[in-house]
Amino acid sequence: MPRHLARRSVYRFFVVLSTAAFLLLLLAERSAMAADVSSLFQQARTTATQLSRDAAIMETYPRTLVTWRTHSSQIDRIKEHINTAGSILSQLHAAREDSQPWHQDAIDGITPMLKELASNTESIINRLNETPKLLRHPQYVQYLKSNAQLANDLATAIRNVVDYDDTKTKMEELEARLLQK
């Protein structure tokens, strides 16, 4: 083979090799971003589970003889969970552009749920502040039921995303192993 053709072949080989290396780095970076988003969803799952549990507990209060202070203490816990979930959601929105399509869909889906839950929780707080003695009023009871249902729906939606992520990751690992053989 003439020398100039050998140089071209070596040059092409290095171009292909460097392009492949660049693509692998890009894929690794994207995978790391997806892992970060997955990690954020796992944090959101923990928070949403706590939120759901606390909202369900509070929903039972009108059927018991707990004081308005107990209601107030519980709604403060719920508010903290909502604030934590809001912070995680902000981070998810910041990473949204570089995330997987199903992550983007999930972020878009949970955003209005969390906003509605925050609005409903604010209504509960306002109701408690205005009339702490009317803890069995039908409108207040409805706020509590609605909050419990919204919190449960949010926890379920986030849990489904985490489960899908786990399954997808396992499938990709198995596929990679099969391709290596």
Image (cartoon, rainbow, N blue to C red):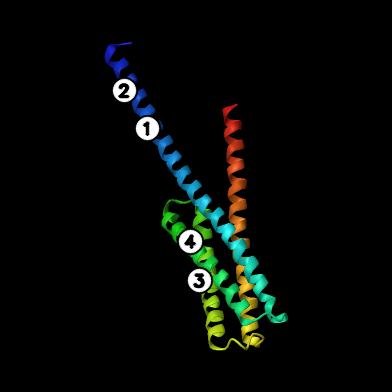
Q: Which of the marked residues, 2 or 3, is nearer the chain's N terminus?
A: 2
Q: Which residue is mark 4?
A: 89
Q: Which residue is mark 1?
A: 19
Per the image, label 3 sits on a secondary structure element best described as helix
**Residue at mark 2 to residue at mark 3: CA–CA distance:** 56 Å
Residue farthest along the left direction in this orientation: 4
Q: Which of the marked residues, 4 or 1, is nearer the chain's N terminus?
A: 1
Q: In the rendered structure, which amino acid carries the disc numbered 4?
A: Leu
- Location of residue 131 by image quarter: bottom right
Of tags 4 and 1, the one toward the viewer is 4
Q: Are marks 1 and 2 in contact (CB under 8 Å)?
A: no
Q: Are marks 4 and 3 in contact (CB under 8 Å)?
A: no
Q: Position of residue 38 (x, y in %)?
A: 53, 50
**Residue at mark 2 to residue at mark 4: CA–CA distance:** 47 Å
Q: Position of residue 168 (x, y in %)?
A: 59, 46
Q: Position of residue 75 (x, y in %)?
A: 57, 74
